[in-house]
């Protein structure tokens, strides 16, 4: 009924415009889907291990006096085109309100952060992978790199990396790097077996490999928790500048508070299946080759999607003529949130039995950016397996 009403409302549009449609499936995820926690005991243990190692390194002359404050942090994920940057988003920032519980304040005076009844105030940026985070983790797709030059002052590996709830063991894999000004960056929840082979005391430069994104320790899904500390085991530093954090940005290029974009477009013969904890196996059901007459699910996977943001979709034949076009706004979906850290929606279309065969294009224009995905229409082709989640 809702779809019929929308179509009636848009019936006066010209052929050059797109009719608004409701999706055939999909949903959104908030920041809790990519979050973490540490007990006070673990925080104290990590700080103690860090300080013990720092003292030992200073005694060996491997850590020198303090330099001026570092600036220009690079993004702490390896820039693999289409994966290490494009298939990611930010779910949570530092909680600047030290009180708890549910007393939240991020750097833009919003509530994109969290705390717990146990007294944990989120102390970093949660940078997650999307879509198919578990499949991406299993293919070692997203590397973690040093945001600035420094010295490795702590690291742990060997812990399970398939945590998916706050009930997981408090055993993250991590690497800590102290910078020349005494600040220390924590890189937490790394994939088991992925941490750098460089020993404690080794130097790194900005961009050096430290590990791979995982979900070890108390973590609800694959993500990197990047946390910056003041010198001498001091308080957490929020590297983002905003209305509620007057300190200059520590980033070389600070990303926007809402970094809205389509991470990827995809085609499916069966809808994707995202696991529910304790299951951690994605079923992407991706296909890039279909037969004429096939019913195909055309999916858009978003980060930071908000109400009022309109997507224009088009299906293009091999000659680039338009087969179908439509528009979509998540606000039209009943019960949807005004903002999703990650979301996906799919629309089902039938490829004509007459084709034409060849390379078709699924296109989306969202927030001024055009994304495309090519797929093959091949006579007699039957999908017999899943496509690589990186494609």
Image (spheres, helix red, strand yellow):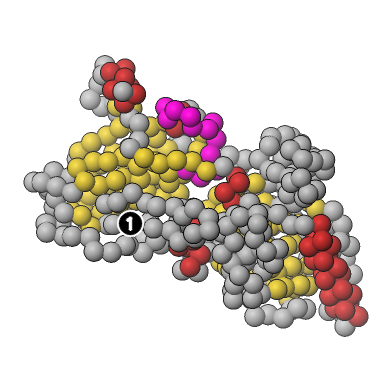
Q: Would residue 188 be found to the left or right of residue 292 on screen?
A: right
Q: Nearer the viewer, residue 248 or 220?
A: 220
The quarter of the image holding the N terminus is top left
Q: Position of residue 278 (x, y in %)?
A: 53, 58
Residue 335 part of the magenta segment:
yes
Residue 57 part of the magenta segment:
no
Q: Position of residue 231 (x, y in %)?
A: 86, 60
Q: Is label 1 in a helix, a strand or a loop?
A: loop
Instruction: Tell me the residue that label 1 is attached to.
Output: 286
Tell me which residue sits at (61%, 70%) in the image. 160
The quarter of the image holding the C terminus is bottom left
Q: Would residue 164 be found to the left or right of residue 243 on screen?
A: left
Q: Position of residue 119 (x, y in %)?
A: 80, 48
Magenta range = 332-343
Tell me which residue sits at (45%, 49%) in the image. 263
**Is residue 87 in view from this perspective?**
no
Residue 303 against residue 37 in the figure, above or below: above
Q: Nearer the viewer, residue 331 or 262?
A: 331
Q: Would residue 258 be found to the left or right of residue 246 on screen?
A: left
Q: Would residue 188 be found to the left or right of residue 50 on screen?
A: left
Residue projecting furthest to the bottom: 60
């Amino acid at each position: 009924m809702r779809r019929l009403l929308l179509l009636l409302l848009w019936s006066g549009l010209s052929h050059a415009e797109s009719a608004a449609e409701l999706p055939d499936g999909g949903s959104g995820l908030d920041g809790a889907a990519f979050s973490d926690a540490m007990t006070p005991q673990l925080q104290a243990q990590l700080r103690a291990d860090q300080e013990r190692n720092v003292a030992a390194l200073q005694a060996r002359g491997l850590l020198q006096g303090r330099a001026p404050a570092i600036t220009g942090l690079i993004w702490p994920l390896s820039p693999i085109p289409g994966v290490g940057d494009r298939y990611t988003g930010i779910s949570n920032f530092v909680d600047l309100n030290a009180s708890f519980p549910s007393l939240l304040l991020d750097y833009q005076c919003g509530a994109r952060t969290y705390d717990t009844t146990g007294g944990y105030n989120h102390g970093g940026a949660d940078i997650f992978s999307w879509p198919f985070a578990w499949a991406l983790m299993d293919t070692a797709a997203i590397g973690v790199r040093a945001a600035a030059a420094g010295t490795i002052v702590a690291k742990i590996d060997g812990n399970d990396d398939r945590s998916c709830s706050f009930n997981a063991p408090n055993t993250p894999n991590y690497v800590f790097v102290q910078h020349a000004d005494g600040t220390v960056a924590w890189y937490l929840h790394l994939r088991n077996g992925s941490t750098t082979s460089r020993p404690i005391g080794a130097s790194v430069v900005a961009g050096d490999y430290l590990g791979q994104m995982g979900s070890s320790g108390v973590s609800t899904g694959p993500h990197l928790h990047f946390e910056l500390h003041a010198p001498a085991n001091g308080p957490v530093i929020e590297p983002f500048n905003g209305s509620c954090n007057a300190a200059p940005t520590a980033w070389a290029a600070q990303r926007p508070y809402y970094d809205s974009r389509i991470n990827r477009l995809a085609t499916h013969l069966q809808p994707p299946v995202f696991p529910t904890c304790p299951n951690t196996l994605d079923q992407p059901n991706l296909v890039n080759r279909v037969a004429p007459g096939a019913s195909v699910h055309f999916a858009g996977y978003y980060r930071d999607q908000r109400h009022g943001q309109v997507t224009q979709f088009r299906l293009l034949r091999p000659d680039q003529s338009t087969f179908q076009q439509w528009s979509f706004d998540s606000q039209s979906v009943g019960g949807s949130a005004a903002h999703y850290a990650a979301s996906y929606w799919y629309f089902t279309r039938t490829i004509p039995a007459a084709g034409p065969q060849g390379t078709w294009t699924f296109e989306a224009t969202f927030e001024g950016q055009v994304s495309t995905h090519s797929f093959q229409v091949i006579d007699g082709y039957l999908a017999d397996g899943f496509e690589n989640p990186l494609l």
